[in-house]
Amino acid sequence: MGMSAGQARLLTITQRLNDNERQAQSITNAKMRLSDSTARVGEEYLEALNATQLNYTTYDSEGNKISQKLTAAMLTQYSELKTQYVIVNSYGQAMVSEADAGNFENSNSLEEFLQNYDTDDSSAKNWYTNLWYRMNGNNDTKSPASEQSWTVLSDADLNSTKWIQYALQNGTVTLEVAQYAETSDDENAVDNIEWKSVIYTSALDIVETDADDSTLAKAEAEYNYALQQIQAKDKEYDNELKALDTEHTALETEYDSVKQTIEKNVERSFKAFS
């Protein structure tokens, strides 16, 4: 091998060694990210094992107990024998359904607002009267917007079991309950009804239970599947690293061989001219 050819070969091997080391470093970084993924998957599984479900308990007209997964609609939509709640955001605004918001906007007074509902039942009339005052303030006629305190809760969130549970457990919303005022001269009370803040864990009709077996089984299946995917990818990375290591060893051997050949050629050249 001539000296110029040997130098060219040496440069080529050096470039391949650098590429080899960059690939190995990239794969090593990817393996580290897999470790993070393993930790995250484990945390999600533990969260699922420790998860609880919020249920809403009420009674039908015959006094039978009914328990269902909690939604915002169950808390805020009228039905007989229910405690009346409003969901309140961080601005202190009542979060009302799209239907209730539309009825309020199209009404100039409490009387008009009630006409949108079937209020022949006195309990229904009381319910929507309470809602009007919570949205409008203590006026029977429509208050200026600056004195109103409400916002729209989308139908999707209204009927979602996940949204209300997350919002309550993480404190992004709170609850208020309509109840009889203890004193009739309370400035926030209207017709002896006032809205009081209540912690959801102390509300008797909201019950926190452990996740059901089907939810736990699903969480375990998802955990095992994710772990298998991570382990398979990790093995793939190990095989790639092993191949790169073998290639790196071969390149180093070839590098040393070419370098020795060049050195011998240089040594012979000096001897020839000495």
Image (cartoon, grey):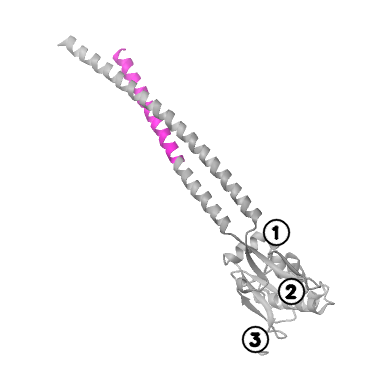
- Residue at (38%, 32%) from the top-left corner? 21
- Residue at (40%, 26%) from the top-left corner? 247
In the rendered image, residue 47, in percent from the top left (x then y), is placed at 55, 56
Q: Can you identify the residue that label 3 sits on?
A: 187
Q: Quadrant of residue 154?
A: bottom right
Q: Residue lying furthest right in this view?
A: 120
**Residue 146 appears left or right of 24:** right
| The stretch drawn in magenta includes residue 245 | no
- State the residue in front, 76 or 208: 208
Q: CA distance from mark 3 to mark 1?
A: 35 Å
In the image, residue 224 sits, relative to residue 160, either above or below, namely above
Kindly check if marks 3 and 1 are in contact, taking CB atoms under 8 A apart as contact: no
**Residue 202 appears left or right of 102:** left
Name the image quarter holding the N terminus: top left
| The stretch drawn in magenta includes residue 15 | yes
In the rendered image, residue 201, in percent from the top left (x then y), is placed at 60, 71
> Label 1 sits on what residue type?
Ala
Secondary structure beneath label 2: loop
> Label 3 sits on what residue type?
Glu
